[in-house]
Amino acid sequence: MLDALRRIVQEVNAAHNLDEALSLIVERVKSAMHADVCSVYMTDYSRGEHVLMATDGLPPRVVGQVRLKLGQGLTGLAASRAEPVNVENAPEHPAFSPVAAIDETPFHGFLGVPIIRRRKNLGVLIVQQRLRRKFTVQEESFLVTLAAQLASSISQAEIRQSLDRLDRDALAVTLFLEGVTSAKGLGLGEAVVVFPVAELESVPDKQVADREMEVARFRLAVAAELKEIRRLSKRMQRLLSPGDRALFDAYALLLSSDSLVTGALNRIRAGNWAPGALRATIEEYANVFEEMDDPYLQGRAADIRDLGMRLLKRLLQGEQRREGQHYPERTILMGEEIGVSQFLEVPPEKLAGLVSIHGTGASHVALLARGLGIPAVFGVTNLPLSRLNGREVVVDGYTARVCIQPSPTLRQEYLKLVEEEAELSRGLQELRHLPAITPDGHRLELHANAGLFADVAAARDNGAEGIGLYRSELQFCLRDRFPSEEEQAATYMRVLQAMAPHPVMLRTLDIGGDKPLPYFPIEEQNPFLGWRGIRVSLDQPDIFKTQLRAMLRAGSACPNLGILFPMITCVSELAEALELLRQAHAELLEDGVPAVLPRVGLMVEVPATIYQIDTLIRKVDYVSIGSNDLTQYLLAVDRNNDRVAKLYDGLHPAVLQAIQYIVTRVHLAGREVSVCGEMAGDPAAALLLLAMGVDKLSMSLGNLLKIKWMIRTIPLARAQELLTEVMHFENAGPIRERLNSVLDEYGLGGLIRIGK
């Protein structure tokens, strides 16, 4: 059964469209379970029906004709209960509902299993037998397991079918894909798919103008690889036995034969570029071997994919030499997981949006996108990357949706929304140099988060009163080695001078988690609970002290320096970090550098810090609450996991109570407290932070003027009333609804769109 399950899923994944996928399912499942009938009903929520979309055993003419109301019959029962329905004699069951178009009375044994993906019922998979019997526990388990795995495959097949329709008729259907909002805003543009060189399956299709030139390029790559393989085989002659060298012979045979090469050439001549044609051909041949019964032959699929990777690298090297990456005037960057380097390669003026399969709003690239005001939707698990390159795409960061090839009418609607958003932004510009003071006279400092010098310059020009969080790790990410003390000092000096006399809080190196360095990889099964933040710095005192010395050197001429330690979890970590700072200071004085110890703060990001705050606060000058990590750790939600990202909400009552406690304790100690991260830039959350008495908010620059508008509109007394009211609520949803209603009441409805 397990072998049958694997084969069915592989075949369905390779199907070209939904109809083919469903036909494969009913045929293969009927055979595997020795059933008399296998059918698939798909749920059409727009009409409130379950529609028979494929069957093997019932008359083919009824496909698409049989429609059941939601909840009708045994099929509807399985869907509504979201659990299997296993009946010995279906016609005698109270829920049995005869259908006029077909006679199901001869079939007694009935097993229906819902097909569910992300809490949504896609349909029902059914097997029937003439014999009066209940299906066994093993059979039921098999069908449940298969349905769970097929849910994703069916979604993918639906998308492929929709894309096929769009290729035939641009007005045929509007295709929407759902993800997780990562950066608010709207972006329209042309899709540019990027992919890691190491992953053949993520290479996109791309049309070429000169097909014969592409054919020649592919032939050159094959010839060069064949020559390299023969060279390797000869070099290994004395080191490996003939059996061990057989792999080289197999590779050479594949490259010399017409089967694989001709398949790729045919696809190139049909218009696809060489890497895309190679990917499709390798997938086709690898699937053939994986479906074979012989374990040895099944294992050859991996060899075929490995050969495909070798050819891909050779092709891409040639592509890079031939021409650099072209970016349209309005680029929508798409990928399986977009890295910082890929993000930064696109000229900022051309980047209109980001879309990826993996990641959420708390990933490092999402933070950069928000800082630059670029809409992003991540966690789009059904994103068919290989079919999207060059298509028109809309990134809707407000509804967390991606629209592929919008119709002319829909395009105009989006363009209208983009103009409304731009008009709102233009209206906010008059607030740039006004203070953030409530109507009843309460002052709140608004700072910006930054990581690049461009962020700092923009923050200064847009009225930020300081940099509340400077992500120093970005300077490390942009290099192929650790930057020297001199290089770091020059960068920090430039940042401090650009914001003077306003304060700049330089956070020490915060890598690990979702922020690896290419030249200092950290491979862990659970990186967010692993070696990251201050833990890395304390374990690498050479790197840490170099950075601290660079910060102090920059601060020797700029009194607006502040240093912030990330991910502090215990008193000993803070004490050790402070001791290294003192050592760095003493060393600089010995070297004749007139360094001065700056204000030092710690970030509250983990629950352990909350319960030690009274001790920790006595050792530093201020506290910065990192709302992103604090929310993640309090709620046990990996903020980069799209499956649970919807559970990540800074307005969760536990998060609000924790922040209120921290603010109270820090103020009792006579220190200041700031909040950085998503909550600071979320109008609903910022309203509560204002009421709690937070001294400063530090946020992505794109949200600063919107938050200032809110503060200058709503009195502190009204915010405090709301805080008292919502702290009795039990869930985040009602809290956000209540806060949004108040924003709307004060004429701030435009801000609601940028809420969660």
Image (cartoon, helix red, strand yellow):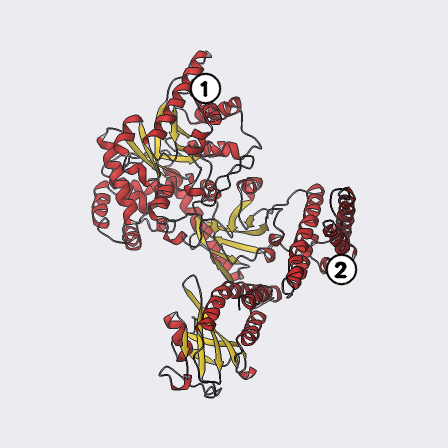
The circle on residue 553 is 1
Location of residue 105 (image quadrant): bottom left
**Does the rendering let one see residue 69?**
no
Identified at 54% across, 45% down, the residue is 351
Q: Nearer the viewer, residue 28 or 347?
A: 28
The circle on residue 262 is 2
Figure disc tally: 2
Q: Earlier in the sequence, mark 1 or mark 2?
A: 2
Classify mark 1: helix, strand or loop: helix
Q: Is residue 686 left or right of residue 493?
A: left
Q: Is residue 621 above or below residue 606?
A: above
Q: Position of residue 388 (x, y in %)?
A: 59, 56
Q: Amino acid at mark 1?
A: Arg
The circle on residue 649 is none
Residue density around tag 2, few if under 14, some if 14–19, many if 20 or more, within 10 Å = few
Q: Nearer the viewer, residue 387 or 459?
A: 387
How far apart are the alpha carbons under marks 1 and 2?
63 Å
Residue density around tag 1, few if under 14, some if 14–19, many if 20 or more, within 10 Å = many
Q: Is residue 82 above or below residue 724?
A: below
Q: Amino acid at mark 2?
A: Thr
Q: Is residue 542 above or below residue 705?
A: above
Q: Position of residue 479 (x, y in %)?
A: 56, 32
Q: Nearer the viewer, residue 416 or 503?
A: 503
